[in-house]
Amino acid sequence: MPREAEPSLNEKQFVLQALQENLRLDGRELDQYRPLDLSFGDQYGVADVTLGRTRVLAKATAEVTVPYADRPLDGIFTIATELSPMTSPAFEVNRPTETEVLLSRLLEKTVRRSGALDTESLCLVAGQKCWSVRVDVHVLSHDGNLIDASCLAVVAALRHFRKPDTSMDAGVLTVYTPAEREPVPLSWLHSPFCVTWSFFGDEADIAVLDATWLEEQVRVGSCTISLNKHGEICQIAKLGGTPVDAVALLQCTSVALTKVKEFSDLLDTKLAEDLKRRDKGGFMAELRAENER
Amino acid sequence: MASDHLFVLPGETIDPALVPTHKKHPLRLGPGLRHIPPSDIVPTVAGQLITNPLKNSMWVEFNSQRYIPTTGDLVLATVTRNAPEAYLCSLSAYTPAATLPHLAFEGATKKTRPQLAPGQLVYARVALAHRHMDPELECVSAATGRADGLGPIAAGNGCVFDVSLGFARRLLMARSREDGGVGVLEMLAGQDPEVVVGGAGGGGGLAFETAVGRNGKVWVGSESAKTVVLVGRALQETDRARLGLEGQRRLVKRLLREMR
């Protein structure tokens, strides 16, 4: 099984030494993100997030299937993450590494379990037909902080996504093509985002946001906080590592809220820009089939 | 070095008039060119075709990320583990492990060989590189028995920065400023009269040392961590944004101002 190349002793010691002097290798502040960019594809539901040299692409798709027998009124919503060897030589196909398992678990907890997508609205015929929404996360380039970038990509892809419009007429379900009826957006309840803190030093007293891959290899622990712009925390994951002071964690959470508000604003502006780009001739409002919430 | 700035694509035919001819030396083909008998020379990568009539050699200058070891290259290797008779080193995440024999250091005998821990950084020369074998490194010149600046780099000193292979090659050129167009290190060290930012001595006036590896790694060492970060950022930014000399001057000025 291939292993990730360890950084040299010089790099490990220098990262720590520099952080103790409040310096980062790329000249950022400790609580500063790398330049974040978000773009949408030509199709609905494709989001491309670039965070420094980390790049994640998420694609949402929907198909009509049979709902699970124990949940006849719910649609199906899955998030698939796979880290390919293109990302890093340490990843193999069909053999999930710890990174991959943690990433998919965290996305699951943040987006699915927090009820961001109303799965009941995906039901078409109770117990017989429902939409199955699937998001595929592709990591194109890995330079640390995959969790935050992937979470943003998944949320952006789902909010950008439009599923085909349907109608029920005398027991006959019709799925319309985009040419017949304008596709409709998903019923989206709130947008959670992940903010990951990395801790350094023997006492874990240095907290750093948006760690690069080198910093991730040196850190003594990390904590991922998922919350939406209203400050509602969906989950906090502090999986092992050096114990962190509770007061410091509270501080981290409040900083995370400001970052989440920035993400939320970025996503809103980008979605509005994209809508404007697609809305040629200004017919979009008339074509829309869904009601205002 | 006389050169035509000609851009070639893989598989393109090279004009025979461009191939250098020399009475004594045989023709030497460098990276990116392939000889197809009897007399065809075909580029295998896209890049700038460079010919040197004095040495009767030609090669393609191109930028890439994946390092392929070649005999005589100076590289920055990281020791991964100790094997009998040799250390196993990694040159980059993708290349197979290179071997560094225990006796390939200056004045090393079986009893006095240097003890290197895993993760130790070594500045070494590629002694043997064959397509189907693991590369072999050395830290001593076989001809003179001297280290000539090669050897282990003390742990806890400085940091390593990744750059592209083309940029590392430009940094290693004998006249990197004139031929390679890289003057960022001189500017930071304060040897460029045009970069003056405050300070008593004028110029950058930073004290640091570097070791450039052809495997796309640059080690920067200094007393102050601030200087190391600054030099590393200047190098990576120059490489990433493909800055010319004027752009480098502006970058150095900006970085120095930020530091104060």
Image (cartoon, rainbow, N blue to C red):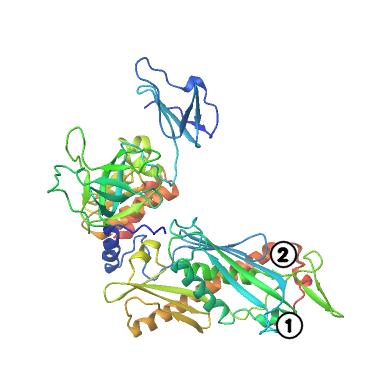
Residue at point 43% right, 47% down?
B65
Specify the subunit that label 2 lies on: A
* Image quadrant occupied by the C terminus of chain B: bottom left
Residue at point 46% right, 31% down?
B33
Q: Disc 1 residue type?
A: Gly
Classify residue A113 as left or right of residue A1: right
Residue at point 39% right, 59% down?
A3
Q: Indicate which disc, 1 or 2, sits on the residue closer to the N terminus.
A: 1
In x, y percent, where is residue B150?
A: 22, 43
The residue to which callout 2 is attached is A279
Identify the element where label 2 is drawn. loop
Q: Disc 2 residue type?
A: Asp
> Which residue ends up furthest to the top in the rendered image?
B23
- CA–CA distance between discs 1 and 2? 37 Å
User: Can the viewer see residue B108?
Assistant: yes
Density class for disc 2 (Cα within 10 Å; few <14, some 14-19, many ≥20) is few
The residue to which callout 1 is attached is A127
